[in-house]
Amino acid sequence: MSQKLALFGGKPVRTTPFTRWPVFGKTEEKRLLRTLHSGKWGRLQGNEVALFESRFAAEHGCKHGIAVVNGTVSLRIGLLAAGIQAEDEVIVPPYTFFSTASAVVEANAVPVFADVDLETFNICPKAIEAAITPRTKAIIPVHFAGQVADMTAIMAIAKRRKLIVIEDAAHAHGGRFKDQPAGSVGHLGSFSFQSSKNMTSGEGGIITTNDDDLAEACRSIQSCGRIPGGLWYEHHVMSGNYRLGEFQGAILNCQLDRLETQTRKRDQNGQYLAAKLNDLPGIFPQKRPTGCTRHSYHLFMLRVDAARFGAHRNEVIKALQAEGIPCSGGYVVSLPNQPFFRNKAFGPYIPKAADRLDYTKSKIPNSDLLCDQTIWLEQSLFLGSRKDMDDIARAFEKVYDNRNALSKNASPL
């Protein structure tokens, strides 16, 4: 006989907290204090950011790293550096954070949505092909949850169609595709160091590339349009001060020291949990293709098929939370259904294109289904022990065993 769900007064599977995030210690404290006492707090005075840029780029298989204030800015700078012009089209997935597409609009270009694959949850190469028009100039594949997209197929499309590829690797620090680091396969890579990310300094981002010309262009846009050998008050391109500060650089140098060990642990725990959940009816963890040689598990993501599981995703989340398992449903709607796109609230950008755009016609059934079916478990849970994974699996099993009671007591959707 199954145990009563904690949601209905039973004993929860877990009462102890999971790994706290962020992980930090004396090393961060010492480095921050050293930076403080140096009095060199800006990127142009100190050496913490410069050191971090070179180290992070090397760790991710790239010659160049350009650190910036956040991941949204890194995408926008990448688009501008790549020569994207007004009204050019950039293909993006509909299941991703707002910034992947808003950065395109801020570059005065037009986001075009190509649906995701229902098994890998990443942008579908066939959908990319179908979305290409004579106006298409770039693709931004998102390595969602930390699993690198199918870069072999995407780069083949890009080569054939002469398109720029900017990897949105905000989730994929330390991830690998066919043993190539995330951020090194496309023409440019974009990472975020926002609070929830697998490496964090509270806020921040970095652009990676192996292309010398793109790196120089990014560096100029990042630092007020200056160029090597130019005068200090000499500005060449539309730009601003997007440089990262030395305090964040100090933290990130310490966080980078932790990344390899943490990424291996997340990947091991993620694979272990996926294997334990695979046999539960109606539960579909993100499918890992053979090309994914290391998953960063910024999120452990799965679908709940209510018809096969016996309860809707929303009710499953409530039950899991009551069992002591932190989780959420992720995105509420696909990006084309956000008010920003429905209302075409683009401000001064793409005025001519806006007249012809109708995002209600976007064909994104897989993305819409994910918004109704997914459960997210955050990366810090996967820095724990195998027992932690066993507790998560036991909670899912307990909810499944009580699916009839859960469904019977479900509130209307």
Image (cartoon, rainbow, N blue to C red):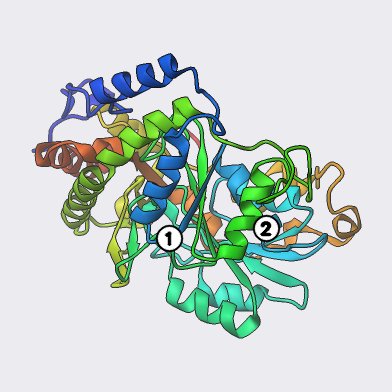
Identify the residue under disc 2.
81
User: Label 2: few (<14), some or many (≥20) within 10 Å?
Assistant: many
Seen from the viewer's position, the closer of residues 353 and 324 is: 353
**Is residue 312 visible in the rendered structure shown here?**
no
Q: Which mark is residue 62?
A: 1
- The residue located at (69%, 50%) in the rendering is 227
Identify the residue shown where x is 36% and y is 19%. 34
Q: Is residue 234 left or right of residue 122?
A: right
The percent position of residue 215, horizontal first and vertical second, equals: 58, 57
Camera-nearest residue between 45 and 3: 45
Circles 2 and 1 in contact, beta carbons < 8 Å? no
User: Residue 190 at what x, y percent from top left?
Assistant: 52, 52
Image quadrant where one finds the N terminus: top left
Classify residue 240 as left or right of residue 254: right
Q: Is residue 72 above or below residue 159?
A: above
What's the amino acid at mark 2? Ala
In the figure, is residue 181 to the left or right of 118?
left
In three-dimensional space, the C-alpha distance between marks 2 and 1, rounded to whole angstroms, equals: 17 Å
User: Residue placed at 17% from the left, 27% from the top?
Assistant: 14
Q: Nearer the viewer, residue 328 or 65?
A: 65
Residue 37 falls in which quadrant of the image?
top left
Taking the view exactly as shown, the residue that stands out farthest to the bottom is: 160
Considering only vertical position in the picture, is 158 above or below 87? Answer: below
**Which structural element holds mark 2?**
helix
Identify the image quadrant of residue 90.
Answer: bottom right
| Label 1 Cα crowd, 10 Å radius (few <14 / some 14-19 / many 20+) | many
Q: Please, what is the three-letter code of the amino acid marked with disc 1?
A: Cys
Mark 1 secondary-structure assignment: loop
Can residue 33 be seen?
yes
